[in-house]
Image (tube, grey):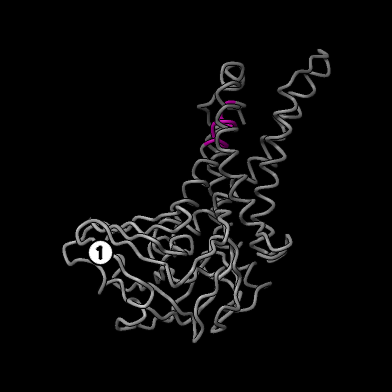
Amino acid sequence: MPRRLTNDLLLALVLALVLSGVFGWALPVEIAQPLYDLHRALGAAVLIVLVVWKQAVIRASLARRLRRKTFDRSLIWGAVGVIGLIAGVALGVAWTLNLITFDTLWGYSPLNIHVFLGIGLLAFVGVHAWVRRKSNKASAAVVSRRAALRLGGLGVVALASWQFVPRLASLVTLPGVRRETGSKFAAALSGNAYPAEIWLFDRVPTIDPSTWQLQLTGLAPRTLTLADLQGAPQQQVQAVLDCTGGWWTEQVWRGMPMSALLPANASRVTVESTTGHHIEFNAQDLNQAILATHVGDEPLSPAHGFPVRLAVPGRRGYQWVKWVARIDAT
């Protein structure tokens, strides 16, 4: 495979992997389902490009440098990039095959490291492809019958992996343990007894329930206390919290429905935590959401969002804002 095409293809695949992963988080699970399969197929394609074509380019480059005895910092950066790519793909494969899980690294999920590597490598691979583009013009023609056949073969193998990898994973994972998102079972109907991992590295704030207030801003500004929320009509929702750290739990959440809290003419709603973390929604996306004060029969623990967290069925965990302090409806 021509060096320039190999680099450009690797960049395109890494970009597609990052985009499919990010949109897989941001979109409702039922809409994002095709992206999960696409992400796995793209991961297989990256592995093939690395093992079959990129390693040949690297070996040829090292051989030329050894002959000419020319070594520079690009060797170090190249090694870092290759290690990062291999580590990212290896973590994804190991996760899929259930060789590692969300608590493998002393309570910190390897899936988070997989994400950080993917996003970081996007810029790295982009710079590498740009810097090498000029020198790689001397490689074999990009548009050729051989290159087309190899690209076709890559596509066939990636499509086959799309079906093969989930089937292989099902052999090493009990039914119902793994969701289509890749997240693995942590707990069910257990109250506060489920993981309290904070992906964004927020610290658990200390909140005095007697002085805590919820600020409603925008179309209908007002202030609510915890007693106001608990004294309002309550709603129970049994829903899955699917964390981007790679675990899921199904619990019964209880609290004030968002539909009773928001103005009827609201179109956009921003829910903000005391830590500053905030998520913006279309108002209709919150029709089934509640401001949960309880999980099961227990008040939320501090690590799980006490006194109030947003529970949004069908959305990924990072959108279930903890320690809600402000809701802005416009």
- Which residue extends farthest left? 265
Could you tell me residue 279's position as x and y percent?
Answer: 39, 56
Give the camera-side residue of 52 and 285. Answer: 285
Q: Which structural element holds mark 1?
A: strand
Q: Residue at x 79, y 14 (%)?
A: 70
Identity of the amino acid at label 1?
A: Arg
Q: Is residue 325 depicted above or below 142 in this figure?
A: below
The picture quadrant where one finds residue 135 is: top right
**Viewer-nearest residue: 100 or 274:** 274
Whole-percent x, y for residue 246 in the image: 59, 63
On the image, the x and y values in percent for residue 36 come to 50, 59
193 drawn magenta: no
Q: Nearer the viewer, residue 148 or 268?
A: 268
**Going by the picture, which residue comes out furthest to the bottom?**
297
Residue under the point 51% across and 83% down:
298
From where the camera sits, is residue 146 visible?
no
Q: Is residue 155 left or right of residue 72?
A: left
| Residues rendered magenta in the picture | 4-11
Quarter that holds the N terminus: top right
The residue drawn where x is 60% and y is 38% is 121
Q: Nearer the viewer, residue 300 or 27?
A: 300
Dominant secondary structure of the residues highlighted in magenta in the image: helix
Q: For residue 10: magenta?
A: yes
Residue 65 shows in the view: yes
| Image quarter (top left, top right, bottom left or bottom right) of the C terminus | bottom left
> Disc 1 designates what residue?
222
